[in-house]
Image (cartoon, rainbow, N blue to C red):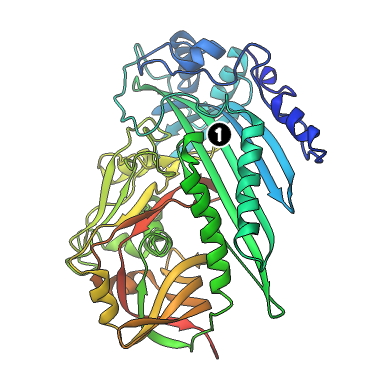
Amino acid sequence: MNRREFIVNGAAMSAITAMGVPLFTSCAHSDSAGKPPLKKNLAAVTGGGGYFESNFGIDEDLVRKVLRAATSLGGDFADIYFQHKVSDHVGFEDGQVNRAYAQVDLGAGIRVLKGEQTGYAFTEELTPPALIKAAQTAASIASAAPVKPVDTFHSVKIPRLYADKAVWIDVPASDKIALAKKIGDKMLSLNPAVIKASTWFGDSDEAVLIANTEGVWVEDIRPMTILYANCAAQKDGRIESNGFSRSARRGMEMYSDALVDEIATQAVERTMLLFDATVPPAGEMPVVLAPATSGILLHEAMGHGFEADFNRKEISIFSTMMNKKIAEDFVTIVDTALEPEARGAVNVDDEGCPGQHTTLVENGKLVSYLHDRISARFYNVKQTGNGRRESFRSIPMPRMRVTTMENGPHSPEEIIRSVKKGLYAVDFANGEVAIGAGDYSFYVKTGYLIEDGKLTAPVKDVNLIGNGPDSLRKITMVGNDKAIDWGTWTCGKDGQSVPVGLGLPTVKVSSITVGGVNS
């Protein structure tokens, strides 16, 4: 089965053409050829067998030959990352589907490590000659006698955090179009002020296989779906817009009537709130971070600084703080792969390390970085399962999964009552961070003023400006209402993007610079 057999003009093409909607790209997938793009079930996690052997002939003998070529010039270690991903995307705007396309990605990346150096090559053809040639290219990083080839592969026990089968390949394109349209129509019906409604729906089934010279052989099927709803409303000559999103490693069953209503209602309510919002005065003040979405500040301002490659290279401000007190005793920060069906969940990372839970800050003390294979070897510690990559075209590096702060001893009501004058930040949009210094700037789309211990006027167009380590030290209260945000969070680093999750309980930071009026 070659990669072109997966690209046929099937159900999605027919459904969209019937609606008279221009199609930006004309390839879609179906199983009309009798060979479905993704097999229904993934074989047990054992050496040999499984998805890639059944569909592409990738067996142990071939993998041994490729790894032998990869270490032919004396590399210390080599691995192969096979990937096959089938995706659909549908956009709805102005009462019709105006964007739709399908993607198929297939290939393998081969990595060779020699000391501190990495050799990497990839191929989009899963044929023995192409794989051997890529392995030889990656091997050129080294120049010594060949190392002993791998004899046998062993199974890797991994958690089951999401369905171990393809869940989207059999969902008709018409159902996906109907879902996007339903949410768009719902937004238009909720308030007469809404003048434009758009939705963006995406889904994918992805299969990966990781094998290496230590005998690891592990396969995983990774489903994903995203839905983003945005609306614009007009009132008294002003136009405001806002949105709401959901994403998870789930199938079509995720989109219940209740969730459809929530997505549409939240998008409209968040938009209408902006008409009553004002821009607050600028200056330093206490900031209370609302649960769930505010985890983006934790992810960006602190999480990246905990990634081990930045610390190994002494770029991160946390590189000299291991085992030191960096926050109050009630602050514990974790990064986990084990949140079932979450966008950032992974049964196994892209280096073959099983998904796991990593505590970064425990009772205020920095106790671990986020490690891939290279950094774990440098620090002489175990891998934490954070070796992730965008695709087979990319090398793995330390990346976050689902990054959260654990519950603290305070109630959210108690936290808000403790603030005489400050800001309650609810919904974040853009932000940027300088990893080295830890300086950050975040745009708060919506929030509220806190006056005399109560939430009062809504605010908008606010910037939070601060420093990650400094803000950590200034966390004076942590709530007991931890929540995960199930939005469409995607993290970019060194040109690679990966899906992530984040969360937070209600948190009080005693002082952050708020950029508002006269800022």
What secondary structure is marked by label 1? strand
Dot 1: within a 10 Å radius of its alpha carbon, few (fewer than 14), some, or many (20 or more) residues?
A: many
Q: How many marks?
A: 1
Q: Position of residue 66 (x, y in %)?
A: 50, 17
How far from the left and from the top, in percent, is residue 391? 54, 36
> 109 or 320: nearer the eye?
109
309 horizontally vs 441: left or right: left
Q: Residue at x 31, y 23 (%)?
A: 156
* Residue closest to the eye, 4 or 255: 255
- Note whether residue 166 is visible: yes
Q: Is residue 97 left or right of residue 130?
A: right
In this view of the protein, can residue 499 be seen by the observer?
Answer: no
User: Does residue 415 sit above or below 57 in this rendering?
Assistant: below
Q: Residue at x 39, y 37 (%)?
A: 346
Q: Position of residue 428 (x, y in %)?
A: 49, 66
Residue at image position (44%, 88%) is 283
Query: What residue does disc 1 label?
Result: 204
Name the amino acid type tagged 1: Ser
Q: In front: 151, or 40?
A: 40
Residue 27: name its quadrant. top right
Q: From the viewer's side, name the closer residue of 132 and 182.
A: 182
